[in-house]
Image (cartoon, rainbow, N blue to C red):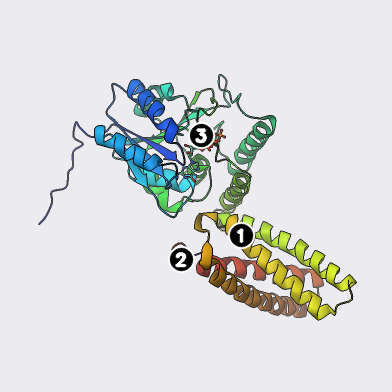
Amino acid sequence: MNFPVVAAVSDVAPQLTVVIPTFNEVDNIDPLLARLRETLGALRWEAIFVDDNSPDGTARALRDRGRLDPRIRCIRRVGRRGLAGACIEGMLAAQGPIVAVMDADLQHDDSLLPRMYDAMTEGADVVVATRYAEGGAAASFTATRSMLSRTATVATQKLLGVTSSDPMSGFFMLRRELIDDLSPRLSSQGFKILLDILATAPAGLKIVEIPYAFASRQNGESKLDNRVLLDFLGLLVAKVTRDVVPIRFVSFAAVGTLGLALHLAVLRTILVNGAHFATAQSVATFAAMTSNFLINNVLTYRDRRLRGWRLLPGLAKFYAICGLGAAANIGVGSWVFWETSRWWVAGIAGSLIGVVWNYAVSTALVWRDKP
Ligand SMILES: Nc1nc2c(ncn2[C@@H]2O[C@H](COP(=O)(O)OP(=O)(O)OP(=O)(O)O)[C@@H](O)[C@H]2O)c(=O)[nH]1
Ligand SMILES: [Mg+2]
């Protein structure tokens, strides 16, 4: 049977979709929905929550609310974590031609939504609710967070040519079509989806900014941690290199550097206790590979983290991959040394090949998307 394609937008379709990523936000749902109902009263809207299987029952609570009000839907993702990926999935599921993204924890001033929507209907491609333009504020930030956030903002403006005053904002609105076009090139890893969108979109986007004061979290706990910084650096490097260097690579290389330091420390400790070099080197190699595997598992690949019995085959594969990586390192290094007679060029070339091999093959075989 052929179903007719619905060409026209009916007068019951939503005009605006609000995408709200959630992880353990059950206590914020009702206050947020009450605010949305009040603020968006005149518009036809829908709210799509994207929940990463929160243990506190956020998804169940949302399903209950959705039974009473079909404008409320929840996408429940199982076995995956990540703010950016959640936002992308929510935006792609939107029925409305205009999509807003906002946090669930009441830090984003929902009363801005109608003004943001008006700016979109007046021709903006993206509307950013900004903390860093005249009239905006982020008073709840600690001094360190404020400094990091502002430094990161300036870095993206200078390095990526992003013009927004607050490309790290989690509160913005855009056309659904823009996401349809960009989604294959966006990264599902990380916390900074707006930055990825602005850095990936073609030049000439019409961006409108509306200042607001970032409030304090009302209920529940922050999910922001130090890993966000690594993700940010990865995104920055990926965009500066036009996606030649993948986002995870920065974290993988940083863990590798840490592994090298551990290797040298273990090697020295064993050598000073009188062991043979070969024995000390073997123990140090295994210690570094094991620690690299465990740290990458919780840091670089945390959204694909191996747990329980899966750790063992993962570790075995990682040993094998690193072994071949070392062989590639030595082979390429020797060849470059033969060609150039410069020990340091050969050393760098060999190490680069080794780390790229380890990264690429580990991503494909150890932490692949669907293990
Ligand atoms: N689906 C999903 N949502 C997430 C994830 N991490 C955070 N969130 C949601 O994304 C929003 C922003 O996270 P927050 O922890 O509030 O981050 P923040 O606002 O930058 O930090 P605070 O100021 O400390 O609250 C909240 O609605 C979270 O519930 C995740 O891994 N998956
Ligand atoms: Mg928050």
CA gap, disc 2 and disc 1: 16 Å
Numbered label attached to residue 296: 1
The CB of the residue at mark 3 lies under 8 Å from ligand 1: yes
Numbered label attached to residue 371: 2
Numbered label attached to residue 220: 3
Q: At which x and y percent is residue 121?
A: 34, 27
Q: At which x and y percent is residue 230?
A: 62, 49
Inspect the image, locate mark 1, and give the three-letter code of the amino acid beneath it: Asn
Mark 3 surroundings within 10 Å by alpha-carbon count, few (fewer than 14), some (14 through 19), many (20 or more)? few
Mark 2 surroundings within 10 Å by alpha-carbon count, few (fewer than 14), some (14 through 19), many (20 or more)? few
Q: Classify residue 224 by image quadrant.
A: top right
Circle 3 sits in a helix, a strand or a loop, which is it?
loop
Determine whether 178 is above or below 43 in the image.
below
Q: Is residue 113 left or right of residue 81?
A: left
Circle 2 sits in a helix, a strand or a loop, which is it?
loop
Question: Which comes before the other along the chain, label 2 or label 3?
Answer: 3
Determine whether 63 is above or below 329 in the image.
above
CA gap, disc 2 and disc 3: 31 Å
Q: Nearer the viewer, residue 284 or 196?
A: 284
